[in-house]
Image (cartoon, helix red, strand yellow):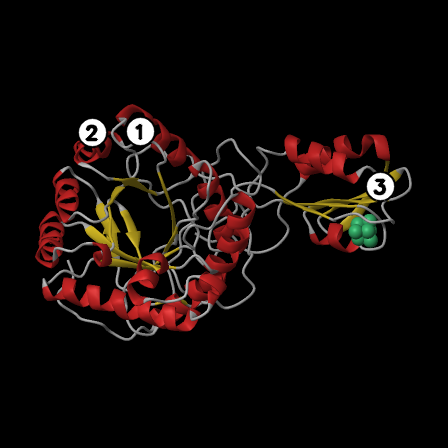
Amino acid sequence: MHGAGGIKPAGSGRTGRLVLICRAQGRIMARCYAISSRRPQGTRSSPGHQVEGNLVRPTQPFDMKRRATRSVRVGSVTIGGGAPVSVQSMTKTHTEDVEATLAQIGELAALGCEIIRCAVPNRKAGAALREITRGSPLPVVADIHFDHRLALAAIEAGADGVRINPGNMRDRDGIREVYRAAGEAGIKVRIGVNSGSIRPRRGLEVRGGAGGKELADLMVREALAYCQAAEEESFGDIVLSLKASDVPTTIAAYRRAAGLCDYPFHLGVTAAGPAATSLVKSAIGIGALLAEGIGDTVRVSMTGPPHEEVRAGIAILQALGLRAASGPEIISCPTCARCEIDLSALVEEIGRRVQDGPAGLKIAVMGCMVNGPGEAAEADVGIAGGRDFGYLFRGGKKVRKVPAAGLADALMDEIEKARPTRGVPQG
Ligand code: SF4
């Protein structure tokens, strides 16, 4: 446990290097690691690090310096301190239904989720946590509101961490008791301050996004005061979150806090809505912060199955080059009046047929000879369509002309032959 270090200025730093790829069934851009052990280890890439020999390649052309933070352990997963950014989600079963909850955790683990959070709204759920922590392949964080005694019960039940919002717990002594118990158990506490818990108490406007900066400042001030109270109990294994339901306030809050403390951050936009809305808000909110080097673990909030949250979190990390590709990447054009082949059907077929293809393989499927050859030549393999035919490219070179009806098969032949052409393997 960290000592009573107080609030410290943040600096900057870089992560170490480790790439191990496991492949599992799933989508091309969001497929991820098969995790069978209780604590997943070392299955992610670090910034700017790709392996060509194993078909995992560079995707990060800008210099991303991760914010320097203290490191906090959650089970065997490290958050902060330069550790790879982890993906987490929350179960959406009733926690007291141990069988259903463990089944869902298993599914999420197979998709690549690395930390799981379970709501503990009552004593029954707290009691179920003991069995869940024993059976879970992932570190389990108990999500507690209002009643500090539930947090104590969760710690006693073997949770790897608890998430609290001290703002909605009245018993100040009780909260201090939680920090002491977490310290004794050697587990982390996430202090999560949400915009929704600040606005009503501070009398801020809810509508219109007015006062976003003021709200962000209040969130940070409150959160750091809570952290200070924990440090006074000699407890410093804190992960901080400052989620608002709008993107600008979320970004402003994390940015501000990044300059005022060295706690690792759990990133997310809270109550981000259904899939389409959540994907946009989360990709912008989480993505913008990660691109600035801010953020150590992410949770995409989405109305819907938690599986999509995990897929989205992984896709955000992969898009920024913070996680190695776990499958091939298809680059396809949106089509326009110049397109003279059935590109949508071709992309759909190729996508289906390459699901188990090599991680990081770039496949360009382009509709015409205007922009097509350039994109196709930059990919490992590619097609640029023409009238009733297409040109095949491999390793940046045009290799042959194929009738439209045979394009999918011909491209699959080239994919089989494709080998990476750039870079040096790293380990
Ligand atoms: S590659 Fe050709 S068909 Fe596709 S969008 Fe561009 S111009 Fe249109």
Does residue 362 appear in this view? yes
Q: Residue 131: give its label.
A: 2
**Is the CB of the residue bearing disc 2 within 8 angstroms of ligand 1?**
no
163 or 355, which is in the foreground? 163
Q: Amino acid at mark 1?
A: Leu
- Against 332, residue 175 (above or below) is below
Instruction: Residue 374: give x, y in percent of width and height.
Output: 77, 56
Which of the two discs, 2 and 3, sits closer to the camera?
2
Task: Write down the residue under mark 1.
Answer: 102
Q: Is residue 427 left or right of residue 163?
A: right
In the image, what residue type sits under mark 2?
Answer: Glu
Is 426 drawn above or below residue 405 in the view shown? below
From the viewer's perspective, tell me whether residue 370 is left or right of residue 249: right
Would residue 12 be seen by someone viewing this image from the given angle?
no
Would you say the beta carbon of the disc 3 residue lies within 8 angstroms of ligand 1? no
Q: Earlier in the sequence, mark 1 or mark 2?
A: 1
Is 208 positioned to the left or the right of 220 in the image?
A: right
Q: CA distance from mark 1 to mark 2?
A: 9 Å
Q: How far apart, in angstroms, are the residues tagged by discs 2 and 3?
A: 58 Å
Q: Residue at x 84, y 39 (%)?
A: 341
Q: Which residue is mark 3?
A: 390
Of residue 253 and residue 172, the one placed in the foreground of this image is: 172
Q: Earlier in the sequence, mark 3 or mark 1?
A: 1
Image depth: mark 3 or mark 1 in front: 1
Neighbours of disc 2 within 10 Å: few (<14), some (14-19), many (20+): some
Q: Is residue 139 placed above or below 246 in the rendered structure? A: above
Q: What is the crowding at mark 3: few (fewer than 14 residues within 10 Å), some, or many (at least 20)?
A: many
Q: Amino acid at mark 3?
A: Gly
| Outermost residue, top side | 99
